[in-house]
Amino acid sequence: MCRDTYFRQGRQVTALVEMSTDAEHSPPAEESMPSHRALDFFFTPEDAPAAGGDNPLAQPTTQVPEIIQALCDRFGKAILGVEEYAGEQTVLVEAQHIADVCRFLKDEQRFLYLSDVGGADRFVEEDRFEVFYNLVSFEKGKRIRLKVRVDESTLIVPTVTGVYRAANWNEREVYDMLGIRFEEHPDMRRMFMPEDFEYYPQRKEFPQLGIPGSLPLPPRTPEGPLQYDPFPTAHEGPTPKSYQEPPSQITEEE
Amino acid sequence: MSTESAFRTSGAESVFRFWPRHNEAIYERLESKHVWLEQALRAEARGGDPLEHEMILNIGPQHPATHGVLRCVVKMDGETIEKSVLDIGYLHRGIEKLAEHKTYQEFMPYTDRMDYLAPYANNVAWCLAVEKLVGINVPERAQWLRMIMCELARISSHLLWLGVGLMDAGAVSVFLWTFKGREDLYRIFDEVAGARFTVSHSRIGGLVADLTPEAFRLIHQFVDDFGQEIAGWEALLNRNRIWIDRNRDVGTLTREEAVEIGLTGANLRASGEPYDIRRFEPYLFYGEVDFDVPTREEGDSLARYFVRLEEMKEGLRIIRQCLDRLPDGPIRADDAKQAYPSKDEVYYSMEGMIHDFLYTDVGVAPPKGAACYQAIESPKGELGWYLQSDGTGNPWRAKVNAPSFTNLQGLEHMMEGSLVADAVILIGSIDPVMGEADK
């Protein structure tokens, strides 16, 4: 099953694909019968990403050839490649060298401001997780994106908090959402989810609806036990009242 | 359904009944955080803490001064905050996860619920990011209208900040006056979008509908009247002794510090760094209008107040220019693969209906491997979306760079060393919105 079909409306499209493969392997149909060859179904056209500067929203700030050149001169093989889309250049860096690269960019190329750090799950690809860094240089008026990739088996990236203090919370967020640990980070706690939660919700295998019972919920009454069922009214009846209602003053005659 | 015993017991259950490991980690962090040398020496000279000056205080998550559900765990020495640890996530809805399960257009209304004080700016940020990813040309009129509405959203957000900030400082009447201004804005949003609060008016490739003559009348009226309102507030506040004493030298950050801890928006500009996405990477037509980026050098809460007040005035200037230069023309891209067809086409032609259906079902599908980052200057600061596509109609990864999240990190640093009474002013002056910070 090709990957695109997995993501949208999988069943129907898969059926079509299976039909077409069956048709290829089965012996040719009798001539009197019309051959029902299923249509080739491409859910979306498979274009290569357009490199173009023709993007209406492309900005000159994200074109940084001279900085990439300086990085290549300095770090050589630690720079794995450059990607470009919509006029934005992304530099792929070997994970162990990310702190050095950031230090170089900050000290010698004047990228003083760290705008964003985030992670992504590439799921079925090699080197499953990636972390990207969005750096800004006010003086040069440039923005550069660095990217590192780590495999599921290692899941450790050196922290850049030593270079940019601003990366602290962002790296915690990546850890919280994807489970990538940052080496020598001063405060590797979860950012949004409580420590009692044992999953990494941004990973692709985590279900969108969550895992019932994965987190204790507040008690339904002040003295009551903690809840583990997110839908107690459906399973155990209405919510008990946490207070005693005063007896009604209205008599039947009124 | 798992039970209580399924969770690792850490011994902290006797102290913290609810989420014991989480609370334990926060208090451990608070203890293990650096101590300033002078403070440590002072405490030592006193022979530890015989008078029990020190205490740990939880501010929030349910506290009106925290502007939502922010929890600050602070260690105090007398009235001074020695260390602070912020705990956020009480409003975490996993909006990035939700985006992965929606089409691009389907997700747009969710952005209203992020920075709910300026929903229009969020809509535009999302739509621009998707338009960059797909490469959609948006008609000029739509872009000018988006600018008008973004600036109105900025004023609306700053109005709430001003009113609530003053209420934190003890002045309730300004809160009522700014909410009168917000009411005028809500009337405009209601006329424009049909909703006062969660507008969802911007569409990928343009807008859902043009503005009515009545909406233009309201906007003109607002622009004409609002300058006087600001002048009135300035007359009251700019030389108001209580307001200035409460704000001056509170949470002062130098330019270097502000850049280092990554503040954004008005907070960064109040420290002297003129970083504004409208200038740095002009989107829409911000490159063509005439406006100033107000900055201050002091970097304290008072400077942040002045910067935001100036920004409101600049907003009015931008809206006036937009109204003057507004061209006629379509308000949505005329390509049914990129934007919704107009309702006329949908109702009266078969192709229009098919396209409408397809756009709702699948929507735009950027090429596989496409990835881009598009930021706007939202009222709170740099609001950016980093999108990755896998070639389908759903984003493979949508990462929001939320300005409130970025600024709250700076708050933790600013609170340390300030008075606990100033913590309330500080939270107000960096203007966080928890819906956005918690994602």
Image (cartoon, coloured by chain):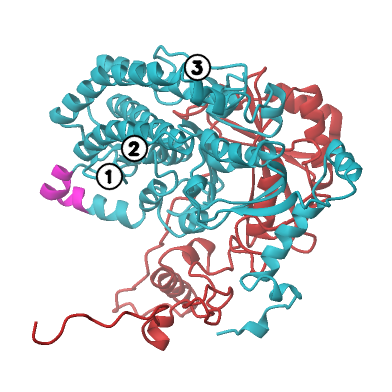
Residue labelled with disc 2: B205
- Mark 1 or mark 3: whose residue is earlier in sequence: 3
Instruction: Confirm or deny contact between disc 2 and disc 1 (CB under 8 A).
Output: yes
Q: Percent position (x, y) of residue B312?
A: 40, 22
User: Measured along the vertical axis of the image, is residue B164 above or below residue B25?
Assistant: above
**Mark 2 or 1, nearer chain start:** 2
Mark linked to residue B20: none
Q: Residue at x 61, y 71 (%)?
A: B18
Q: What is the quadrant of residue B236 in the picture? A: top left
The shade of chain A is: red
Q: Nearer the viewer, mark 1 or mark 3?
A: 3
What label sits on residue B293 in the rendered view? 3
Which chain letter goes with mark 2?
Answer: B
Point out residue B379 in the picture as x, y percentages from the top left corner. 45, 32
Rounded to the nearest angstrom, the CA distance separating label 1 from label 3 is 36 Å
- Chain B painted colour: cyan
Q: Is residue B347 magenta?
A: yes
Which residue of the protein is positioned furthest toward the front in this rendering?
B51
Residue A147 visible? The answer is: no
Specify few, some or many for label 1: CA neighbours under 10 Å numbering under 14, 14-19, or 20 or more. many
Residue linked to disc 1? B340
Inspect the image, locate mark 2, and give the three-letter code of the amino acid beneath it.
Gly
- Sequence-wise first label, 3 or 2: 2
Q: Is residue A183 magenta?
A: no
Residue occupying the far top of the picture? B290
- Both labels 3 and 2 in a single chain: yes
